[in-house]
Image (spheres, rainbow, N blue to C red):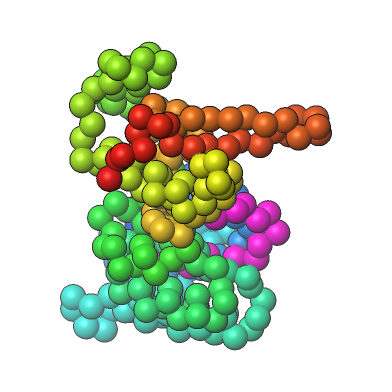
Amino acid sequence: METIKDLRLAVLIDADNVPYAYVKGMFEEIAKYGTPTFKRIYADWTKPTVSGWKNVLLENALTPIQQYSYTSGKNSSDSALIIDAMDILYTGKVDGFCIVSSDSDFTRLATRLREAGMIVIGIGEKKTLQPFITACDKFIYIEILKKGEPVSKEKARKKQSRKMNLDKPEEKEPINKADQNLQKLISSSITDLADENGWAFLADLGNLLLKKKPDFDPRNYGFEKLLPLIKSLNMFEIDVRETGRKNTRLVYLRIRQRDQGIS
């Protein structure tokens, strides 16, 4: 998804299904895509389980919506959020919605909003079920947004090993299934976009990857940007082309000949 700075977004947060510890990183991430016009958070505020959110409401200008739990075991906040989303939709004052929840019950809402021409960004934990993820234009795992999260020694070792071996494809570690799936996704997407010489534009590739897999994000693999992630795979040629404009270069990719047979 392209970053659109002036997009007007309605940010609706299900406080029962996301931890408040990520709120700072969450709003910094949302700012990449637009300006929050509505900022509402839903919960039964009489419950002690959401007490942590109360401390961050004012500093983040969040409007708390009280919804009592009339029936044990039922999340009444869901219906309040859905009703408000449809009301906001019909005001015509937003360009998109950001639904912050790990609850797949919002799948139909996300689908309906997209049918109405809205951009839908989902933010939730990695436990979120696939139907809700697929219903969004982009889905961001909240775990990658927390600032200052310690990196495990094993993760740090693997990341350092990747950097050291970028120019030594013959010494690569065995590829696990997750990496194989990533290679297939990127390879097939390059093939879909490639010109007659096999080259695909990096920005077009990023957009297509999101269309195919809304939760695709280089940060899920330990990289801040798409290009370093692609370099780490050691199976793509990279061509940086000058445009004649200062500080503006275009990056193109194609599958290396020796890797053309990957399936």
Q: Which of 208 and 1 is in front in this view?
A: 208
Q: In this view, does 141 lie above or below 249?
A: below
Q: Nearer the viewer, residue 18 or 60?
A: 18
Residue 94 in percent (x, y) is at 63, 72
Residue 187 in percent (x, y) is at 39, 44
Q: In this view, does 137 lie above or below 108?
A: above
Residue 135 in percent (x, y) is at 39, 69
Q: Which of the 4 image quadrants contains residue 150? A: top left
Q: Which of the 4 image quadrants contains residue 87? A: bottom right
Q: Which residue lies furthest to the right in this view?
A: 245
- Which quadrant, please, contains the C terminus? top left
Residue drawn at x 50%, y 75% is 114
Q: In this view, does 118 lie above or below 176?
A: below
Q: Nearer the viewer, residue 127 or 148?
A: 127
- Which quadrant, please, contains the N terminus? bottom right
Q: What stretch is highlighted in magenta?
A: 1-17
Q: Is residue 5 magenta?
A: yes
Q: Which residue lies furthest to the front in this view?
A: 196
